[in-house]
Image (cartoon, helix red, strand yellow):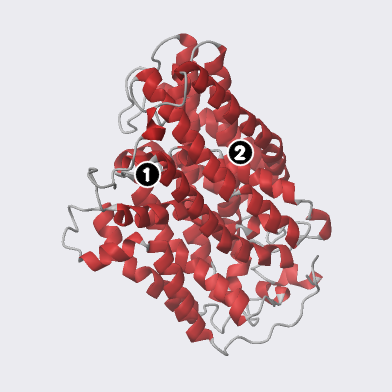
Amino acid sequence: MSNDLSGSTQLWNEDLAPTSAAQRTWRWYHFAALWVGMVMCIPAYTLSASLIEGGMSAYQAVFTVFLANAIVLLPMLAIGHAGTKYGIPYAVLARASFGTSGARLPALMRAIVACGWYGIQTWFGGQMIYTLIGVLLGGEIGGAKIAGLGINGMQLLCFLAFWAIQFWYIVHGMDAIRKLETYTAPLKILICFVLLGWVYQKAGGFGPLLDQPSQFVEGGKKAGQFWSTFWPSLTAMVGFWATLALNIPDFTRFAKTQRDQLVGQTVGLPVPMGLLAALAVIVTSATVVLYGKAIWDPVDLASRMTGVAVLVALVILLIDTVSVNLAANLVGPAYDFSALAPKRISYRAGGYLTASIAIVMMPWKLLESTQGYIFTWLIGYSALLGPIAGILIIDYYFIRKTELNVEQLYREDGQYSYGSGWNLAAIAAFIVGVAPNIPGFLNAAFPASFPGVADVFKTIYTYAWFVGIAISALVYGVMMKGRAPAALRPAAQP
């Protein structure tokens, strides 16, 4: 990066600039630990619940989760390549396809979704502190709900306490997050085995859920309906990590080599995600024997344990939620907000903004009001993010053959400005990719207001991420064929 560029352009700041060789410290095991750390989280643990409630057997649910993560790994590795090759974050990579001004659109889309998740995970963390205090004091705490908020004073204090714990890591930056993930990942794996041992001993086996056939078999409650449940379920499971598939360059830009990001992510995502789903099913299966009902919420389960076990379980869940939330839901929007106004918003200021929005949005209300939030929320935003992934992949691999002129990405009047700062081909491809999913989304999210949506749109919506990524990729590829200027070969990064 030439020295004069930092002062002459509004598109550059130190956080968005390409990483130096000295900053590239992440090896494959750091990426594997990052993914193990992010996979082991409460929302991921409860994913199997939604599938089994939908009629799947334990084995079908675990396979669906594993398959979805094997699928989402492909765009993750493809988009991650650019981060390692050029040392640039997602918000800068998007300038190559959307234009230097247009890139703010995909950055904002990604940031808004992440703020939603950041708030939800912070609320989960606060609830764990609330549960822990209640268990230690031996009763319900907090009193009456505060008017307008819908939660009691103690719940609010616990939410703010957990928010403050995470804030420390925002102040201390990316390296503090890497260290947290690397050190806590082995601990989480150990806890999984301890939990399995505990339920096996307590229940005298692994319980009845494992032997239950799916409801789709002949004579079952939903006989013959497997595929109509499988596809929306698969789309929702893909949607779970669709955000990270986009902004993975925010992490891979710190990789020492391409091999480190490829091996680390491949080892760290699909198999651990499948194993966590299996663990959730086995432990929940045992709760049927122990408590007479299936308990899918690990915080609820932890609160039923006795003695020191409850304390250890909840502290582990707290550490887990901090590490997941910071990696999955803070790093991306911090860069994305910084990219909206690089001269005014640094990475750290972007993190402060994300954390502030998490409080203002009152995530407990979001969880309360979104019916079937896993499906409506996950499929809904996958319909937005799939088209962006399609455009980035086609642009990087097929239009530019992985060759970018890094310096031009930071110039308002450079080859990636497309004249006006907006690449209309990318905007058109995005709109066309999202449009077919809008009627289905409105019907799923607000069935009373949009009851008359045609079946064809409902069907399209069950494949939202796949439909979006395919249509936008095709439209963008056709519109950009032969239009991309040749990239000047930049100085090669390791």
- Can you tell which quarter of the image residue 82 is in? bottom right
Quadrant of the image for the N terminus? Answer: bottom right
Q: What residue do we see at 60% from left, 81% from top? A: 399
Amino acid type of the residue that numbered disc 1 sits on in the rendered structure: Leu
> Mark 2 against mark 1, which lies toward the viewer?
1
Mark 2 in CB contact with mark 1 (< 8 angstroms): no
Q: Can residue 362 be seen in this view?
A: no
Quadrant of the image for the C terminus? Answer: bottom right
Q: Is residue 226 visible?
A: yes
- Can you tell which quarter of the image residue 15 is in? bottom right
Mark closest to the chain's N terminus, 2 or 1: 1
Kindly identify which residue carries mark 1.
51
Question: Could you tell me which secondary element the residue under label 1 belongs to?
Answer: helix
Mark drawn on residue 371: none
Image-based side of 219 in relation to 339, left or right = left
Q: Whole-percent x and y of residue 190?
A: 64, 29
Amino acid type of the residue that numbered disc 2 sits on in the rendered structure: Ser
Image-based side of 17 in relation to 473, left or right = right
Disc 2: CA contacts within 10 A as few (<14), some (14-19) or many (>=20)? many
Question: Could you tell me which secondary element the residue under label 2 belongs to?
Answer: helix
Disc 1: CA contacts within 10 A as few (<14), some (14-19) or many (>=20)? many
Q: Whole-percent x and y of residue 222?
A: 24, 47
Of residue 51 and residue 131, the one placed in the foreground of this image is 51
Kindly identify which residue carries mark 2.
323
- Can you tell which quarter of the image residue 406 is in? bottom right
Question: From what the image shows, is residue 206 above or below residue 23?
Answer: above
Q: Whole-percent x and y of residue 5?
A: 74, 72
Q: What residue do we see at 79% from left, 54% from top? A: 23
Q: Whole-percent x and y of residue 457?
A: 26, 66
Q: What residue do we see at 45% from left, 19% from top? A: 203
Of residue 167 and residue 256, the one placed in the foreground of this image is 256
Disc 2/disc 1 C-alpha distance (Å): 26 Å
